[in-house]
Amino acid sequence: MRLFVTGASGHIGSAVVPDLLAAGHTVVGLARSDSSAAALTAAGVDVRRGSLDDLDGLRAAAADADGVIHLAFKHELTYAGEFVRAAESDLRAVEAIGAALEGSDKPFVITSGTALLAMAAPGRLGVETAALERGPRVDSENTVVAMAARGVRSSVVRLPPTVHSSLDRHGFVPALIDMARKNGVSVYVGDGANRWPAVHTLDAARLYRLAVESAPAGARLHGAAEQGVPFRQIAEAIGRGLGLPAASVGPDEAARYIGFLATFAQIDNPSSSAATRALLKWEPTHAGLLADLEERHYFETSQGVRA
């Protein structure tokens, strides 16, 4: 298939694209900068210049493709405390791409998150069939699932808060490491028993390929290799990696130490991927989160400790 991929040069896209190419697909990647375009060209990808705000361009690229994988998201807005604005932009992009695919039976795979379920029902095991009525990013998810009734083989991949690997430069784990380094301590909230699911980037990439190749219309999929890693263990692993202590802080203190991540750090988000594994024969094979942290690539570069 000739697949249009947004976010093709990003963290997850940089693993999805090689997986697609190795499987014999052709990839057209969305690039909003010269550096992204150059990276995609070097990887053997056809480049489509544009951004998530170029709705006409998104529609045209989707119409020209045999399927679409939508990975891009305005994470910079999320980190600036404007998640709602980022989600609104995502919804507009999803609607534009979906309109171009309507009636074609072409695959359209988008990205959501398991943490959305946890915010609605903390501590409850998140399963693929669970769905929320409305909300930021939830609206994109529901819009895509509804496209199944309009002739689009649509599906949603819900990713854990931690998609980890040496490709991860700007996710939650690097942010926690950076904050621990600045604070001189790696913190968890309360007893730190709340759980974060996790998946290695390369396992997540394979799930996207399987979804675009064969996921049934309207499927909600979970990219959780690990159902839930206690947050205290994550904080302790970060502490070991930095040679710093790990310590508990109260909910009222969390923002002082970990800023915008204070809310996420308290989420109890156990998530099952049993239905996804059975449906698509997806079986994660790469290192778990704690093992990946022990490999030290998060803490060191060729120049030494990452800034």
Image: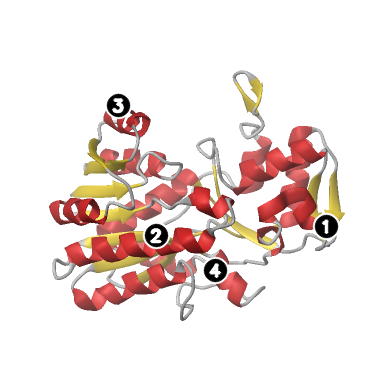
For disc 4, the marked residue is: 116
What residue do we see at 45% from left, 66% from top? 137
Q: Position of residue 119 (x, y in %)?
A: 61, 71
Q: Is residue 188 above or below residue 123?
A: above
Whether residue 140 is visible, yes or no, is yes
Indicate the colouring scheme: secondary structure
Kind of residue indicated by mark 1: Glu
Kind of residue indicated by mark 2: Ser
Structural distance between the alpha carbons of marks 2 and 1: 32 Å
Q: Label 1, secondary structure: give it.
A: loop
Structural distance between the alpha carbons of marks 3 and 1: 46 Å
Q: Earlier in the sequence, mark 3 or mark 2?
A: 3
What residue do we see at 27% from left, 30% from top? 41
Structural distance between the alpha carbons of marks 2 and 4: 17 Å
Classify 10 Å Cα crowding around label 4: few (below 14), some (14-19), many (20 and above): many
Q: Taking 199 as reference, is 35 left or right?
A: left
Q: Position of residue 237 (x, y in %)?
A: 74, 43
Q: Earlier in the sequence, mark 3 or mark 4?
A: 3
For disc 2, the marked residue is: 89
Of labels 2 and 1, the one closer to you: 2
Classify 10 Å Cα crowding around label 1: few (below 14), some (14-19), many (20 and above): few
